[in-house]
Image (cartoon, coloured by chain):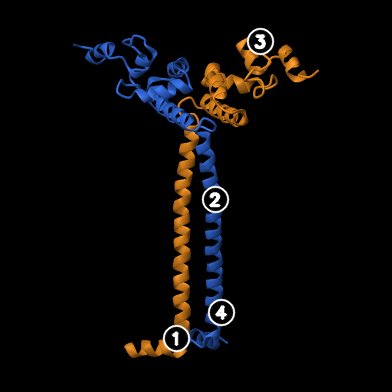
Chain colours: A orange, B blue
Amino acid sequence: MKDGGRKQGVMTPCAACKLLRRRCAHDCVFAPYFPADEPHKFGSVHKVFGASNVNKMLQELPEHQRSDAVSSMVYEANARVRDPVYGCVGAISSLQQQVDVLQTQLAQAQAEVVHMKIHQSSSSSDQHQSSPSSENVYHLGSY
Amino acid sequence: MKDGGRKQGVMTPCAACKLLRRRCAHDCVFAPYFPADEPHKFGSVHKVFGASNVNKMLQELPEHQRSDAVSSMVYEANARVRDPVYGCVGAISSLQQQVDVLQTQLAQAQAEVVHMKIHQSSSSSDQHQSSPSSENVYHLGSY
């Protein structure tokens, strides 16, 4: 059977067509990305973006980019279902805070390294210049 | 006029009602968040989520959370218009990479600090033990 998969697909509609209660056509734009055995994937995308918007967005993209677009839409939709106020913008904002904290900690650690290097090189040059005597002599001399 | 703002609103519909070509009712759910002078704000939200989904999402939230929900939806919609494949998931993924890089750099800097502290304390104890200072005299005295 030359188009076995989709022929079978007509009998077993994809998750999108099943939810939308429509016939899953041979060239259904949803079928490659919303298989019948993953109904929740389309469920959240449909709830958040709406089937007709998802359809339109997919049609506007070349085929090789549609799978990534579906993945990102499913991620975004699930985030919005979990957090109806902030959706995945909540994740962006918390990652941005994490970046800020890490940048501050990194700057502190790097400053400490620089400080220690300066201290180390000055104490090693002190050591070179000030053998037992010189420092003591200096101290004694200052009395 | 006791309800001047919305009375005027009936004559100047909010950006959402203007785009949807419908009468902007006194209790329009969009009006407080999509003023007439910011038409693009509703434009992208409508394109990405669809007016009826936005309406439904707002209705499901208590009023004090709607403004934040609109801001995050506008942010998300603009990101999806700019990048139809990854939307704001692109920002999440690039922030996640930034966090990974910063965590590695921080771990390296902290390891360097620890290494230098160990080196410093071992070299200062070497110095204490080996230099003919007063401390050595004390040590000798204690024998």
The residue lying furthest to the right in this view is A1
Mark 3 in CB contact with mark 1 (< 8 angstroms)? no
Which residue occupies 62% across, 31% down? A64
> In which chain is the residue bearing label 3?
A
Tell me the distance, in whole angstroms, between the alpha carbons under discs 3 and 2.
48 Å
Quarter of image, res A5:
top right
Q: Are marks 4 and 1 on the same chain?
A: no
Mark 2 in CB contact with mark 4 (< 8 angstroms)? no
Secondary structure under tag 2 reads helix
> In which chain is the residue bearing label 2?
B
- The quadrant of the rendering that contains the N terminus of chain B is top left
Give the amino acid at mark 4. Answer: Asp
The label nearer to you, 2 versus 1, is: 2
Residue pointed to by mark 2:
B101
Residue pointed to by mark 4:
B126
Q: Which mark is residue A129?
A: 1
Say left or right for B142 vs B55.
right
